Each structure stands twice: as structure tokens, then as C-alpha cells.
Amino acid sequence: MKVTTVIGARPQFIKAAVVSRALAAQGISETIIHTGQHFDANMSEIFFDELEIPQPGHNLGIGGGSHGQNTGRMIEAIEALLIDHRPDVVLIYGDTDSTLAGALAAVKLHVPVAHIEAGLRSFNRRMPEEINRILTDHAADLLFAPTEAAVSHLAAEGIPDARVHLVGDVMYDAALFYGAKAEDKSSILEQQNLKRGEYVLATVHRAENTDDRERLTAIIDGFAESNRTIILPLHPRTKSRLANFGISVANNILLIDPVGYLDMVMLEKNAALIATDSGGVQKEAFFYGVPCVTLRDETEWTELVEAGWNKLVNASDPAQIEGGLVDVDSFARNVIKPYGNGSAGKEITLVLSSTINDRQKFGS
Ligand code: UDP
């Protein structure tokens, strides 16, 4: 079986690391196409090095444009490579423009498409990620869902059960595999002079927060008013918006460049609380037993809100953000296990091996 993986953004590198390792363990050949969506060394290269992901066979260098420009250029370039490679399956991850471009290029060439992290929904159609997810799920032949909730979203949209596989969350596999390594390899706490359990880790990168001056100002104000020590590894988009909007940052907020995954895990594990608009970081907070304040109106990971691990706050209201950051003891933190048992990568590989050789199962 020949697998082609299409990835381009930071969270996809982390998810792909898990599946790449499982594929290699089965002796399955994989070629990686990196679209170039994230291109800074600390948003891309460091993950390939630290997580030991096979080097991309192709880097398309496509990024920096509008959604339409990027997606269109990616489809064209991926199509040409797939015609050349003729893989047995294309693997795509999550909800970025690279995901949708990989799905559309492959499905129209009748190459089976496998979508990892299928079935997530925010039910907010203004999010570019939501459109990417819905279209990708409907184009995909194999849908690997992380949770029961994701499976029921797919059923509600009429996607046949036979295409859907509940395998657990590859990010849980990653947390188990790299969580212990981070303790050995990362010295970020010493470097940043942070004490375990005494700081808040924050990330902000969603367009709805970064591209809206009032919302971004409210988030920074809420952080400032909490008076807590906050470490904020800055996504390149957030960095540029803070500069463009002329928003200044108070002294209790420590701005640093994006960090590698092992440093990030170390910061997450030892935080008193995490404040984020990231999908992945919300779950990682839970994996490491840290309460999380989500700077959004909705989340795809509703089970964490229901179980009292995660609270949604209105990111345009500094007082709500401040309250969320200060009120750490009010999280119920009920015991739940919604993301499988840490073997999602292996299960995905088994399903791929057993179905790809039998193309009739795709009904094409
Ligand atoms: N992450 C990282 N370094 C950082 C910020 C985030 O390694 O400076 C990791 C984080 O641990 C998580 C993933 O990147 O695994 C989340 O990516 P992001 O927030 O960009 O995307 P989302 O999960 O919202 O799609």
C-alpha cells in the first residue's frame, strides 16, 4: 500500500507524527506533501525534527495568500503530484485549507481519501475551519472520528456508517508518547523563570479573535486585569495583528515566540490554568489535568465543558476573561475518558490496511 499524506499547518504535523510512526511500524510506505501553509522554522521545521516525522517529499511553498488563493493553488499542485504518484490512499488531517485542498484533489482523481479527525463541528459557519471540515468529511471515503460526538455529527449529516470509524484521538496518542519525553528534554520553565503551578499558559490565533481589533484588545485587557503571570507563545498572525492594531501588552504577560511541541507540552503540564482559542490546546489541557478557559463562543470539544474541565468565556468581555483566569477552583473536573485509549494511530493503520486493498468497499 502506498500512502500520500498532505499536511501544512502546525497541528497537522503533530497528528501526522502519530500516524507516520504507526505506518512505519507496519512497513507501509508514506510520501509527505507539505503545502507550505505554515513555513516559519518554529511553526514547521522544529516539529519535523522533534517529532521525528519523515521529511516531506515535496514542499509546495504555498502560503500567505487568501483562503481562495491558497486552496486553489494547493489543489492544482497536489493534483499534479497525485497523478504522478498514484497512491492507494491520501491521508488528510483536521480542518485547514491544506485539508480541503488534499481532499478535493484526491477525490476527483478517484484516489481514496482518509480524513483523520473527522466529524468535529462547531456549528459556526463563519469559521473557515468549519467549512473545511464539512466539505472534507463529505468528500472523504474513510472518516476517522475521535469521539462518539463526532460519529453522531456525521450520522446526522447522512454520511454512511460504513465509511466512519471511531478510533479515538491521535492527539491523545501524542500526549501519551511525548508527555514523558517533554519532562526529560525541555528546559522551558527554567529558561522563562516559571514556577510549576504558578502561571497561566495562553494561546490566541483564531481569526475571529486576532482579526477583530476590539476582541483582541479585550483579550489582552482581560489578561492584564487578572494580574496573573501569563506566558503567551505568539502565533505569527497574532504578532502581526498586535503590531498593526498598536495594542500594547502589560507586564504580567510574557510574550515569547512559538515554541516546539516538547516545550509546549512542558508549559501545558505545569500551568495552573490554560486560556486558549486553540482546538488542540483545549484537549491537551485535559490530558494533563489542567483546567482550561476557552476564548470562544463555542467549542468542538463540548464533552470537556460538560465534564467541568473547560469553560467558554466571551472573548469580547475583559471582565469575563479576568473572572475565568482567577476562578481556578470552580472547575468540576469530573472523570471522563472520551478520546480512546491512546491507540488511534495503530487503529487507523489497521483500518487502512484492511480496506484500501479492497476498493469495492468504497462503493466506487
Ligand atoms: N503548539 C506548539 N507550540 C506553540 C503553540 C501550540 O507546539 O507555541 C501545539 C499545541 O500543543 C497543539 C497544537 O500546536 O498540539 C495546536 O495547534 P494550533 O493551536 O495552532 O491549532 P488548532 O489546534 O487550533 O487547530
Image (tube, rainbow, N blue to C red):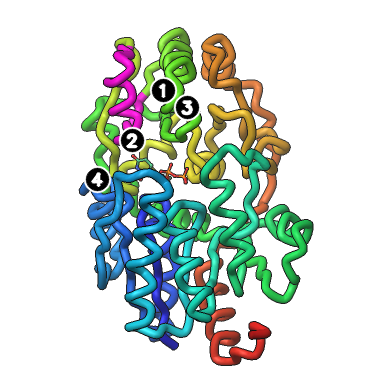
Mark 4 or 3: the one toward you? 3
At 44% from the left edge and 39% from the top edge, which residue is drawn? 269
Q: Label 3 near label 4: C-beta < 8 Å?
A: no
Q: Nearer the viewer, residue 192 or 29?
A: 29
Which numbered disc, 2 or 4, marks the residue that appears first in the sequence? 4
Sooner in the amino-acid sequence: mark 3 or mark 2: 3
Q: Which residue is mark 3?
A: 209
Other residues around mark 4 within 10 Å, as few (<14) / some (14–19) / many (≥20): some
Asked whether, in this view, residue 327 is left or right of residue 211, the answer is: right
Q: Secondary structure at mark 3?
A: helix
Q: Which residue is mark 1?
A: 198
- Which callout, 1 or 2, points to the residue nearer the camera? 2
| The C terminus lies in quadrant | bottom right
Q: Quadrant of residue 314?
A: top right
- The image shows residue 103 at horizontal and vertical percentages of 50, 66
Residue 235 — which label?
A: 2
Q: How many marks?
A: 4
Residue 243 included in the magenta stretch of the image: yes
Between the C-alphas of marks 4 and 1, the distance is: 26 Å
| Residue type, mark 4 in image | Asn
Q: CA distance from mark 3 to mark 1?
A: 26 Å
Q: Is mark 4 within 8 Å of ligand 1?
A: yes
Q: Could you tell me how far apart the alpha carbons at marks 2 and 4 are, in whole angstroms?
A: 10 Å
Residue that mark 4 sits on = 42
**Residue name at image x 26 percent, y 29 percent:** 256
Q: Is mark 2 within 8 Å of ligand 1?
A: yes
The secondary element bearing badge 4 is classed as loop
- Work out whether residue 165 can be spotted: yes
Specify the segment rendered in magenta: 231-249
The reply to whether the C-beta atoms of the residues labelled 1 and 2 are less than 8 Å apart is: no
